[in-house]
Image (spheres, rainbow, N blue to C red):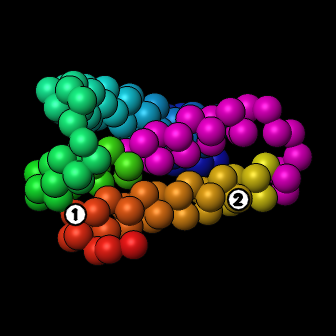
Amino acid sequence: MSLKSPLRRVTYLGSAKGGSGHWFAQRMSAVALVLLGLWLVAALATMGGASHANVVAWLSSPVAAAFAVLLVLVAAWHAVLGLQVVIEDYVGAKGQRLAVLIVVKFVFAVAAVIGVLAVLRIAFGVAA
């Protein structure tokens, strides 16, 4: 005979696990992407036909560089969250699913690092 209540016996069990946290993170990253995307489009639209040097000078400002880094990081995180759901839903074998998830997370981590380094390289004016 167990002294646990029925609710206590099922807490953290079953298919729900941490799904609500994942769902919320994906929605918040989507909102952040919309805001950062609008910022980027508006900033580039106000420049019109600016030269490469003008765009580089703009991206060299601390605020623009910080928002660009945020855009890269949030885009990578949002992509990983979305692909994780697709992989968990459509890859059947547990071992294969784990391997694909690890590869996807690694690829997007590398892509995010490359993107951040590219923005920082422009922001600090490192010559090619």
Residue 106 placement: quadrant: bottom right
Q: Amino acid at mark 2?
A: Val
Q: Taking 10 as reference, is 107 above or below it? A: below
Residue closest to the eye, 83 or 16: 83
Q: Is residue 13 visible?
A: yes
Percent from the top left, x then y, of residue 54? 18, 47
Secondary structure under tag 2 reads: helix
Q: Which mark is residue 12?
A: none
Q: Amino acid at mark 1?
A: Ala
Instruction: Report the magenta stretch's main SS.
Output: helix
Residue at numbered disc 1: 123
Residue stretch rendered in magenta on the structure = 74-96
Q: Residue at x 17, y 32 (%)?
A: 47
User: Which comes sooner in the sequence, label 1 or label 2?
Assistant: 2
Q: Is residue 98 visible?
A: no
Percent from the top left, x then y, of residue 59? 20, 52
CA–CA distance in space, label 1 to label 2: 30 Å
| Residue mark closest to the camera, 1 vs 2 | 1
Q: Residue at x 23, y 52 (%)?
A: 53
Residue 30 placement: quadrant: top left
Percent from the top left, x then y, of residue 101? 69, 53
Q: Quadrant of the C terminus?
A: bottom left
Residue closest to the eye, 60 or 77: 60
Q: Taking 35 as reference, is 63 above or below it? A: below
Q: Residue at x 14, y 27 (%)?
A: 46
Q: Residues within 10 Å of mark 2 (few under 14, many from 20)?
A: few
Residue at numbered disc 2: 103
Q: Residue at x 79, y 32 (%)?
A: 90
Residue 75 vs residue 56: left or right?
right
